[in-house]
Image (spheres, rainbow, N blue to C red):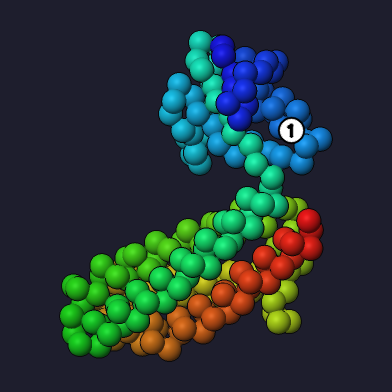
Amino acid sequence: MPIFLDDQPIAFPGRALSEVLSSANDHLADRGRVVVEIQVDGDRLTGDELQAHGNSVVEDTELRLYSANPRDLARSIIAALLTELDQAADLQAQAADLLQRDESNEAMTPLGKMLGIWQQTQQGVAGSVGLVGLDWNELEIAGQPASELMAALIQQLTTVRDAIEAGDFVTLADCLVHEWPDIADRWHEMLTRIIDLIDEVG
């Protein structure tokens, strides 16, 4: 089983993928790095795929592992999400405008893209905070717990989903016009604050 770490050949004990990853992260710990990308025979494993292959025997495969500094990785993720939120704000405004003009079918395209960005943001923030060892439950943004901001986002996502399923485009437009700008502003502030905290950790 050829194993490469950051494109350099290396040997780690273990037959299962999870065992090799554990050994690799132990090896990287002194350098302040962690494995952030895994390729098995050229195929990148992420999310559910990685979990599903955790106990797979990888003796007859080529395994390539790539590492990064957790702080640098988390910071780059949050910075990218800030840019994405600016795009989400534009999409939200487009969707709201189309709904107010009774063009609900056309509004679904920007709305779908906007929701996709927010769902990625929700996942990306939680993962990045964990990468650098920050306690989500102890984070506060302008005196408001970060957990409350997450709960407010989830509530608004649920409101939008329910309005779409019910075909209630009046409520949907109202939500986009009156609720989402405040959500976006507070999350923008939160992400900026998280970047500051990541820099402090470093």
- Residue found 74% across the figure and 58% down from its top: 134
- The three-letter amino acid code for the residue at tag 1 is Leu
Residue 75 screen position, x and y as percent:
64, 58
In the rendered structure, the answer to whether residue 158 lies left or right of residue 105 reads right
Viewer-nearest residue: 125 or 164:
125
Label 1 Cα crowd, 10 Å radius (few <14 / some 14-19 / many 20+): some
158 and 188: which is toward the camera: 188
- Asked if residue 20 shows in the view, the reply is yes
Pinpoint residue 69: horizontal percent, then vertical percent: 69, 45
Task: Please tell me whether mark 1 sits on a helix, a strand or a loop.
Answer: helix
Q: Which residue: 39% across, 66% down? A: 115
Q: With respect to residue 177, does 2 lie above or below?
A: above
What is the quadrant of the N terminus in the image?
top right
Q: In this rendering, would 168 be left or right of 187? A: left
For residue 132, side relative to residue 3 (left or right)? right
Residue 77 in which image quadrant: bottom right
x then y, percent, for residue 135: 75, 60
**Quarter of the figure with the C terminus:** bottom right
Picture coordinates of residue 139 (x, y %)? 73, 69
> In the picture shown, does residue 119 fall above or below 172?
above
Quarter of the image where one finds residue 125: bottom right
Residue at left offset 52%, top offset 63%? 81
10 to 87, vertically: above or below: above
The residue at which mark 1 appears reads as 28
